[in-house]
Image: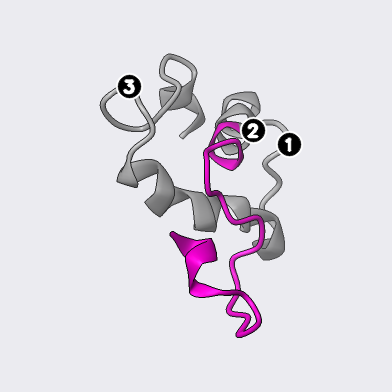
């Protein structure tokens, strides 16, 4: 991932796509599995870029108190 992101801001089409959305959750939670991402600067930059997208949901968990419109 880091090698690819050294020369591209995103994973496909030089723009934010479903590929980035699909890869984000596992990458974001890599620390939970004991994988240290701190030495991968390009991945860190990419994670920040995904988080800065409109309608990004900070914590991905089900909460019945969150209205459905929040996920649109």
- Whole-angstrom CA distance, mark 2 to mark 3, is 17 Å
Q: CA distance from mark 3 to mark 1?
A: 24 Å
- In the image: residue 46, left or right of residue 39: left
Say which of marks 3 and 1 sits in front: 3
Identify the element where label 1 is drawn.
loop
Q: Is 5 inside the magenta-drawn segment?
A: no
Q: Position of residue 6 (x, y in %)?
A: 49, 18
**What residue did someone put label 2 on?**
44
Which residue carries the number 1 mark? 38
> Residue 10 location in percent, x, y?
41, 28
Tell me the quarter of the picture where residue 44 sits: top right
Question: Which residue is depicted at the point 60% across and 85% down?
Answer: 64
* Predominant SS along the magenta part: loop
Q: Which of the 4 quarters of the picture holds residue 31? A: bottom right
Residue at x 43%, y 14% (from the top left corner) = 7
Residue bearing the label numbered 3: 14
Residue nearest the viewer, comparing 16 with 64 = 64
For the C terminus, which image quadrant?
bottom left
Labels 3 and 1: the sequence-earlier one: 3
Looking at the image, do the residues carrying marks 2 and 1 touch, with CB atoms under 8 Å apart? yes
């Amino acid at each position: 991932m880091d090698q690819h992101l050294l020369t591209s801001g995103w994973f496909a089409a030089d723009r934010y796509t479903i590929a980035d959305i699909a890869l984000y959750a596992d990458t974001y939670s890599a620390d939970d599995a004991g994988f240290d991402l701190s030495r991968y600067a390009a991945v860190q930059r990419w994670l920040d870029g995904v988080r800065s997208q409109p309608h990004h949901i900070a914590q991905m968990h089900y909460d019945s108190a969150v209205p459905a419109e929040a996920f649109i």
